[in-house]
Amino acid sequence: MLLDILSDLLKIDDVLLILKNNAAVSEIRSNSMSIKQKEKWITIGDNDGPSHMHINAELISSAEFVEEEKPDRTSFSVRFFDQSGERVLGAFFTKMYDQNNELIAKRKKTYGDLCQKYNSKINF
């Protein structure tokens, strides 16, 4: 199911994938990214291209759809956690608001449809 949700996220334009630890952050846009799995490793992006990531599917234990209230808007994301509850990967929906700071209904529906398909909390 992890490969399925990541595949669905990569089909959506303007999703920012963020790998983060206490020493480094890597950000990759979802637009036109490929995905494949070989044994326990999921590769996002072209292995020979300028940017890609490898995810150990055995170490991702859960995911959660998060709508986080900010002072001027709400952020929408899917966050992936390891067995210790630490966030390993975040998929943040960008360009959710128009120039008037109004939520774009089509983008919100895309997020909501994905949340409904997988449920708001997922255990792998």
Image (cartoon, grey):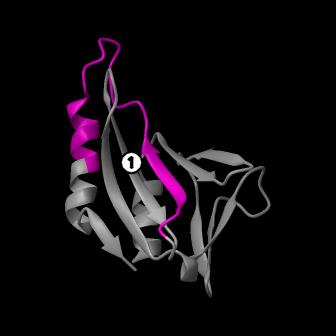
Above or below for 120 versus 74: below
User: Which quarter of the rendering shows the C terminus?
Assistant: bottom left
Q: Which residue ends up furthest to the top in the rendered image?
A: 100
Snapshot quadrant of residue 121: bottom left
| Neighbour tally class for label 1: few under 14, some 14-19, many 20 plus, Cα within 10 Å | many
Snapshot quadrant of residue 107: top left
Q: Is residue 105 magenta?
A: yes
Snapshot quadrant of residue 68: top left
Q: Is residue 60 magenta?
A: no
Q: Which residue is rendered at x = 25% and y = 20% of the image?
A: 102
Q: Position of residue 22 (x, y in %)?
A: 68, 51
Q: Which residue is rendered at x = 54% and y = 50% of the image?
A: 17
Q: Position of residue 24 (x, y in %)?
A: 73, 48
Q: Which residue is rendered at x = 70% and y = 57% of the image?
A: 52
What residue is pinned by disc 1? 77
Above or below for 36 versus 86: below
User: Which quarter of the rendering shows the N terminus?
Assistant: bottom left
Q: Position of residue 53 (x, y in %)?
A: 67, 61
Question: What amino acid is found at the position of numbered circle 1 in the picture?
Answer: Ser
Q: Which residue is rendered at x = 56% and y = 83% of the image?
A: 58
Q: Secondary structure at mark 1?
A: strand
Q: Position of residue 3 (x, y in %)?
A: 47, 73
Above or below for 70 versus 98: below
Circle count: 1
Above or below for 54 versus 103: below
Front-most of residues 108 and 71: 71
Decide if residue 44 is on the left or right side of residue 15.
right
Q: Which residues are magenta?
A: 85-111
